[in-house]
Image (cartoon, coloured by chain):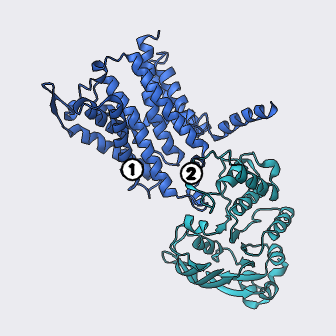
Chain colours: A blue, B cyan
Amino acid sequence: MLDDHLIGVLSNMGMISFIALSAYLVLVVGEISFGQQAFFAISAYASGIASAMWGWPFLGAVLWGAAVSGLAGLLLAIPTLRIRGLYFAIATLAFAEMVRLALEIFTYRVEVDGELVGPDGSEGFRDIRYIYEADISSGEFLLVILALLAVTLAAILWIERTRLGAMLRMVGEDPVLARLQGVNVNLAKIATVAAAGLIAGIGGALYAHLNTYVEPKIFNVMLGVHGLAYGLIGGLGTAFGPLLGVALDIGVLESTRAFSGYRMIVFGGLVAVLLIVRPRGLLDEAAVYRIRRFFVRKDAGD
Amino acid sequence: MLAIDGLTVRFGGLTALEDVSLRAAEGEVLGLIGPNGSGKTTLINALTGVYPATGRVRFRGADLLGLSSERIVRMGLVRTFQNLRVFRRMTVLENVLAAQNGIPDMRLVDLLGSRHRDAARRLRARRLVERVGLGGDADRLAGELPLASQRRLELARALVRDPALLLLDEPSGGMTPAETREMTGLIATLACPGRTVIVVEHKMALIVGLCTRLAVLNFGRLIADGEPTEVLQRPAVIEAYLGTESPVDA
């Protein structure tokens, strides 16, 4: 049996992986977002409202949260379409701070079973009690997280194998050239930012239901910066890259306590070193290409 | 096929192209020359929707100005780049495969098909890679190739769309004389009935060997247009291009 500490670490890794994948998708189309935590937050609230206040079933609440944050992604993507690079990064950061500050004043409470439930501004949103009411253990919830993560990862890996995936990489590497090869760059970017919002939203919904309590200050910029750094550490050549980043940071640095107190120093140093020696992370395109070739060659030899 | 009338491109106060009118007939190989900064690449950028321009450009009867790059390229007007643009993080073959977005027989569902498994398109891409002499490098990352090979890749990538109008922007730029000769031979095989080629170049040997007509730009204006050897004898061209000597000897 897994002990509670391990279950906690794995759950955490699973939920953060959604933010990492979300930031990764935006990186694939060539932009840097410091704001993916906003989608995590939006969905945490939206799904919590659905399950705790409207009495929706858990899975419905997760899908609802992801849909709302996906829609928020769409709303962010349209006005930011024509800005690039540093300016896009600043816009996403500003958007996330707007969302966080809006949640600080967002109050929406209704009476459920004789008790007032709902988001209460900076007091946060308590009593998202699904896992108590349905009597779900943390181990079982871990399986739910891993299942949803597996589905998300499979969807991204599948898209990366398709022409659509190739188009997204074209947009990321050289949008002018992509356009001159018949790619609708605007549509690709809007769709990607919306999808990234949706994916971060799945993680946010899971987070709200596992912790039963969320408050705006959890969703600060450090959450987004970590999500971004995971792709940059693990690599941008494959969706396994950001997961490798999560495993290295949470799985090794945070959880083993070998670096206790120094974790952020080691993490920051790791990001800095990798940005210099491997700007697109450990599993960058060239590495993925070599790995793939290695296996293809083996197949050919059979 | 292509009719340009009064094409003007301005960047703030600078006029990069002024009132350029030019025709290109079907099956023709038109050379476009001019000193550095005369507006050759600007003309290509205006035609492909990269820069906004005024005037009128008709391509197979349709107006081009104001259309987005992706619409223009889908109409069959394809270009290469003076300052080499390939997807360096993709293999040679992937570059050519990726260039097939929006070609007429591509449907929306094809977007979700595996990019590794489309046998017919793959075969076509591989043949073109071999045709430009990159058969042995098909599975290498494009960024690892030497410059001359990257130029060949640009050519294969343009051809995979079977363009009606092919704009080559200095296809032998940065090449050795031997590589330039090979490239000239390769370009000579590209013109065919139904395809017009416009070549921007500095190297006269390439231009004179390939082109059936020659247009000359200087300071954003068209100063000559006609049969190549005749155009190169005109005093205005000689003066613009080299000052005193005949550019044929360059």
Q: SS class of the residue under badge 2?
A: helix
Looking at the image, residue B4 lies above or below residue A66: below
Q: Position of residue A56 (x, y in %)?
A: 28, 32
Looking at the image, residue A265 lies above or below residue B235: above
Marks 1 and 2, Cα distance to the nearest angstrom?
A: 23 Å
Q: Nearer the viewer, mark 1 or mark 2?
A: 2
Direction from residue A177 to residue A109 in the image, left or right: left
Q: Position of residue A14 (x, y in %)?
A: 45, 26
Q: Is residue B142 visible?
A: no
Which picture quadrant has residue B234?
A: bottom right
Q: Residues within 10 Å of mark 1 (few under 14, many from 20)?
A: many
- The residue under label 2 is B109
Which picture quadrant has residue A233?
A: top right
Q: Position of residue B3 (x, y in %)?
A: 62, 82
Q: Amino acid at mark 2?
A: Val
Q: Position of residue A259 (x, y in %)?
A: 48, 18
- The residue under label 1 is A74
Tell me the subunit letter for badge 1. Answer: A
Q: SS class of the residue under badge 1?
A: helix
Q: Are marks 1 and 2 on the same chain?
A: no
For the C terminus of chain A, the image quarter is top right
